[in-house]
Image (cartoon, rainbow, N blue to C red):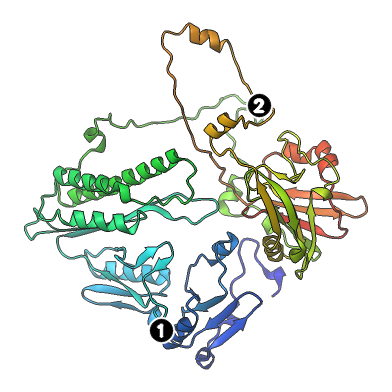
Amino acid sequence: MDASLKNETQDFIFPPELIITNEAILKKRLMCTGPRVTWIRPTSLLDALMIKKLCPEIKFIAGYNDIGLHVLLDKTSHAIMMPVSHLEELGKIVITEDCIRIGAAVPMADIINTFAELISELPGLSQKSIAAEDFFLLDRKVAIQADEIVLSVTIPLTKQNEIFAAFSTHTPHRRDDEVDHVNAGMRVRFTSTGDAVEDLHIRYGGIGLIAAKKIKDDICALNKRMWDEMLLEEVYKIIRKHSDVIITSTKVIIEEGAMKDTEEFQLMTMKNYFFKFFNMVMQEMGKEKIDRNQRMGLSPLRTIKGTQTWQTHTVGAVGEPLQDISSRQISTGESKYLDDIPRREDELFLALLTSSRPHAKIRSVNASAALAMDGVVDYIDRDDVTGSNVLPFTFERVCAEMRYSFIVGEIIGGIIAKDQQIARRAVKSIDVHYEDLGAALTIEDAIETGAFHDPGIDDIYGDPDGGFLDSDKIIEGDIRMGGQEHLYMEPHCVLAIPDVGSQKMKVLATTQDLSVAQGQRQADEWTGTKFIPEAAFRLCRGPA
């Protein structure tokens, strides 16, 4: 493919010439085997079932999947994959009088188009989604046998006097999936007179199967009740009643208090979902909605308005309300990032080996398996840093020295390879032996053991001791707040291009501290590492 024909604002499309249109070829089983992955394309649904029975661990590929994310995060490594999007039985959408049956491999775009056509053709029909009752057992574990696959999903159509809604809440994590903390599907059907509940069905997700089933069963017992505030209170009581069996979706909890806070968040979210559903139904019934603030005895929310003022008399750019110089490029996708810079023929990649212990002695590092891999050039660590190993201003170490690790994610060394994926795989093969020394993971642990950073920082203004002595009342307590991460426009990346003649480096880096990156003192002191002539280095820092 001629790279010179590429439009700078667009990505390459899949070449139409490579699309297989010969049905005879599609009817043959295709198997591609590589050093780590085997790709099998079945000829039919029966063929796919036979392959799955022989290889129960096989990973199906159909539309979006999170395989790349899991491999990147070292969660799983799928050795056998099977595409199923071309199977006719899995690509059908069947519409009946009672339901819509969607094939398990139907693209989302086709589903959206189908619903759009139905909405336009059938007045009063709206797009719905419903959670499966007993299909999802655990995280990424479903109730299917080794010789079974998902053929389709059936979505019932709502009937007269029936209302349905779905809710979800998730918090995106930098190094994990965006999994819902809590989600819910809620459906209510009223009697023909429309004044009493005939069937109330609520299913929560993300709280564990036991809690979800108990809450669902207890709420089903509220049938034949009126849709009023008494019903709202009864649902709240049921949720609180089963709070002891609700499983938090947070995967890593360090403090007991954090666990309690997460459970309270889930309970409040579950109540909030039903409150929204309750008011939505009230609106559908033509009744007055309940005001949350009034019900809780809170003052109504005030509308906050803001204004921007600037000088009417300016001198040049001073005082002018100027637009950020990069806003337009960033918002239109035209900004150039380091990853947009074409790779050089002689470019090498560096993948970092980071510590997995918060406080430990590094007994040994064995990189022999990594160095034996094809494409690996070298392994570097503290011994290869010829200048200062301590960065100015932040006083962080470039690499762990004295064979001690003080934080998870601290750089121990790195693998230089001819390809980024090779470098990352090689880092995973390095064998590091630690001797754990104990770590202070909470503020209380640090106070008890005296584990503070040195030098400490004390900001004292005025006379606090005297102020306390003169005070009529002293209120003491603790306040906690979570850390706040930046929303990165691009991953951390550094491109270093050596000049063989001058023995200097041209460094392109993603940084918010240009003064430090450009400082001559820093360049003189800590850019000295192994110098490989005629090779540019690209460091793309991935998950620790």
Callout 1 secondary element: helix
Q: Position of residue 283 (x, y in %)?
A: 19, 48
Residue for point 50% across, 43% down? 254
Amino acid type shown at disc 2: Gly
Extreme residue in the top direction: 470
Where, by quadrant of the figure, is residue 69 drawn?
bottom right
Q: Residues within 10 Å of mark 2 (few under 14, many from 20)?
A: few
Residue 143: image location, x then y, percent: 36, 71
Identity, as a three-letter code, of the amino acid under mark 1: Glu
Q: Are marks 1 and 2 in contact (CB under 8 Å)?
A: no
Local crowd at mark 1 within 10 Å, few (<14), some, or many (≥20)? few
Earlier-in-chain disc, 1 versus 2: 1
Point out residue 23 in the picture as x, y percentages from the top left corner: 50, 91
In this view, 125 is above or below 151: above
Q: Nearer the viewer, residue 191 or 325?
A: 191
Badge 2 marks a residue whose secondary structure is loop
Write the residue at 42% across / 78% down: 146
Spatial CA distance of label 1 from label 2 is 67 Å
Determine the residue positioned at 66% across, 26% down: 456
Position of 281 compared to 399: left or right? left
Q: Quick one: which residue is furthest to the right in this view?
A: 501
Position above or below: 40 against 386:
below
Identify the residue position indicated by label 1 in the image.
88
Q: Quadrant of the N terminus?
A: bottom right
Spot the residue most to the bottom: 24
Q: Position of residue 280 (x, y in %)?
A: 23, 50
| Circle number at residue 295 | none
Residue 540 visible from this viewpoint: no
Q: Which residue is mark 2?
A: 456
In the image, residue 397 sits, relative to residue 218, either above or below, namely: above
